[in-house]
Image: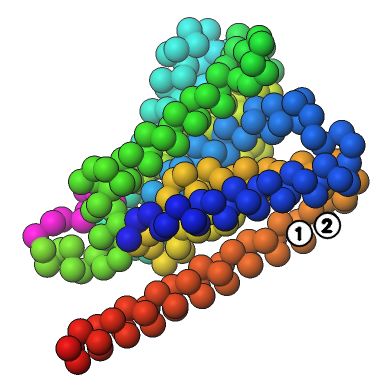
Amino acid sequence: MTIRPWADIAGMVAVIVALVALFSAVSEHFFTALTFATIANQIPALLVVAVGMTLVLVSGAIDLSVGSLLAVSGATMGMALTAWSLPLPIAIALCLAIGLVGGAVNGAIIVAWRVPSFIVTLGMLEVARGAAYLITDTRSVFVGSSVAVISSPIPGLGIAPAFVAAVLIVWGAQVLLTRTVFGRYLVAIGTNEEAVRLAGVDPRPIRLAVFALSGALAALGGVFHVSYLETVDPNAGIGLELSAIAAVVVGGTSLSGGHGSVVRSFLGVLIIALLQTGLAQAGASEPVKRVVTGSVIVAAVILDAYRRRTGDARGSMLRRARRGA
């Protein structure tokens, strides 16, 4: 099952409303248009990475390389703009190509040698991070305001084109997951890959494609990150894979594969962002923010495990009832 009842989404919206109410009571500066616009303009990179992570997790795999692919793609874009003096569209295309190739390499190794995705993407995490350091000579590189238009607030709206683009990607990925053959194959592979193979469908090109897509979305996150800071940072994206997994798991996507929702991952990103911003405005220290965020993640995993066990138990009862009938 790909989408749980709409009550699930309503529950997450209720959590968001509760967080807004809580932090608004704690800090008089929280409930402002500026705070919400700032949150919206800060999350596009994490949001598009979480979209790719959702698709990968639904397929029963995991991608730990997204943070490093974001860094090396962003570094390549920065060098293209500064050292090579390429136009912005070409620099963005090169950035996306780097992420796409990196993700495709992950997928190719996984399907060709049947190596666990955890190991392959962990290796790519180190390779891509090292490449980012080599490209930038381990130094931050100022790109300039030529890229700022991507993440600068639209006059009169307060939100950036990057956020609008990220929301459109969420919508497109949700359609891909729930309304296309490719999405149904992802769910089927995550549920039982051997059954898919026995049904005559080769899961290998689908796995390769989802990792390539995850890499391309990580590279797009690199575009958003560079444009937001107007600087290439070789340390960009460190720990981003954990934040993305946290948001996706909070959104209800199962770590064991087989079901998930991109829309719920979007809401998960919002919950994580609200937590971090609200705690910061409340004066919480970095260790406290980590403890609270980690606790939320653990609670989400426990809830997912409970739901799966309850679903399995109900399924067993229904099957026994049908046999008895």
Instruction: Write the residue at 55% across / 13% down.
Output: 81
The quadrant of the image that shows the C terminus is bottom left
- Which element type, helix, strand or loop, lies under badge 2? helix
User: Which is nearer the eye, 268 or 225?
Assistant: 268
Q: Is residue 204 magenta?
A: yes
Q: Is residue 91 above or below residue 304?
A: above
Tell me where the magenta segment starts and ends, as one range: 200-208
Instruction: Write the residue at 50% across / 11% down.
Output: 88
The quadrant of the image that shows the N terminus is bottom left
Instruction: Specify few, some or many for label 1: CA neighbours under 10 Å numbering under 14, 14-19, or 20 or more.
Output: few
Instruction: Write the residue at 37% across / 59% down.
Output: 259
Q: CA distance from mark 2 to mark 1?
A: 6 Å
Q: Quadrant of residue 267?
A: top right
Residue 189 position within the rendered picture, expressed as x and y whole percent measured from the top left: 27, 60
Residues tagged 2 and 1 counted as in contact (Cβ below 8 A):
yes
Q: Is residue 187 left or right of residue 93?
A: left
Q: Is residue 246 above or below residue 170?
A: below
The residue beneath circle 1 is: 292
Q: Is residue 305 above or below residue 43?
A: below
- Which element type, helix, strand or loop, lies under badge 1? helix
Tell me which amino acid carries mark 2: Val
Q: Residue furthest left?
A: 200
Q: Is residue 229 above or below residue 156?
A: below
Tell me which amino acid carries mark 1: Val
For the question of whether residue 183 can be seen, the reply is yes
Q: Is residue 26 magenta?
A: no
The residue beneath circle 2 is: 288
Q: Is residue 147 left or right of residue 22?
A: left
Q: How is the protein colored in the picture?
A: rainbow
